[in-house]
Image (cartoon, rainbow, N blue to C red):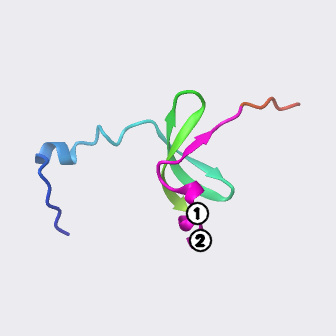
Amino acid sequence: MTHYTILPEEAYWDQKETSDNYTEIELGGILMQVRMEPDNRATIIRLLRCSLDDYLNPAFAPGQQITFVPILNKP
């Protein structure tokens, strides 16, 4: 595979940019990689395990925001 870019080689292979606050969550049976944001939010980066139809669902498109609502669990 050939990749042409104007970036210097050091910047292209530098792993600092990919070490953001990424985590994997499962939502509705779909495993996805998300970047954690402030205020109980996460941004979808990519889908890791899902059906083919889920790729066409705009709710799961990369860049979409997920909001976490805190809930108290009763023992």
Is 52 in the magenta?
A: yes
Is the residue under label 1 in contact with that under label 2 (CB below 8 Å)?
yes
Amino acid at dot 2: Asp
- Range of magenta residues: 50-69
Name above or below for residue 50 compared with residue 11: below
Residue plotted at (20% across, 69% down):
1
Q: Which mark is residue 9?
A: none
Q: Secondary structure at mark 2?
A: helix
Q: Residue at x 58, y 63 (%)?
A: 57
Left or right for 10, reference 58: left
Instruction: Measure how far apart labels 2 and 1 are at the Cα level.
Output: 7 Å
Mark count = 2
Q: Amino acid at mark 1?
A: Asn
**Residue name at image x 88 percent, y 31 percent:** 74
Residue 65 on the magenta segment:
yes
Please give the residue where the numbered disc 1 appears in the rendered image. Answer: 57
Q: What residue sits 51% from the left and 59% below the top?
A: 48
Q: Which residue is mark 2?
A: 53
Q: Position of residue 71 (x, y in %)?
A: 77, 32
Q: Outermost residue toward the front?
A: 58
Query: Label 1: few (<14), some or many (≥20) within 10 Å?
Result: few
Screen quadrant of the C terminus: top right
Q: Report the mark closest to the observer, 2 or 1.
A: 1
Q: Nearer the viewer, residue 24 or 62?
A: 62
Tell whether 10 sits left or right of 73: left
Residue 68 pos. (x, y %): 65, 36
- Residue 61: image x %, image y %? 51, 56
Label 1 sits on a secondary structure element that is loop
Left or right: residue 74 versus residue 17 is right
Residue 25 location (% of width, % of height): 59, 47
The answer to whether residue 40 is above or below residue 17 is: above
Q: Specify few, some or many for label 2: CA neighbours under 10 Å numbering under 14, 14-19, or 20 or more.
A: few
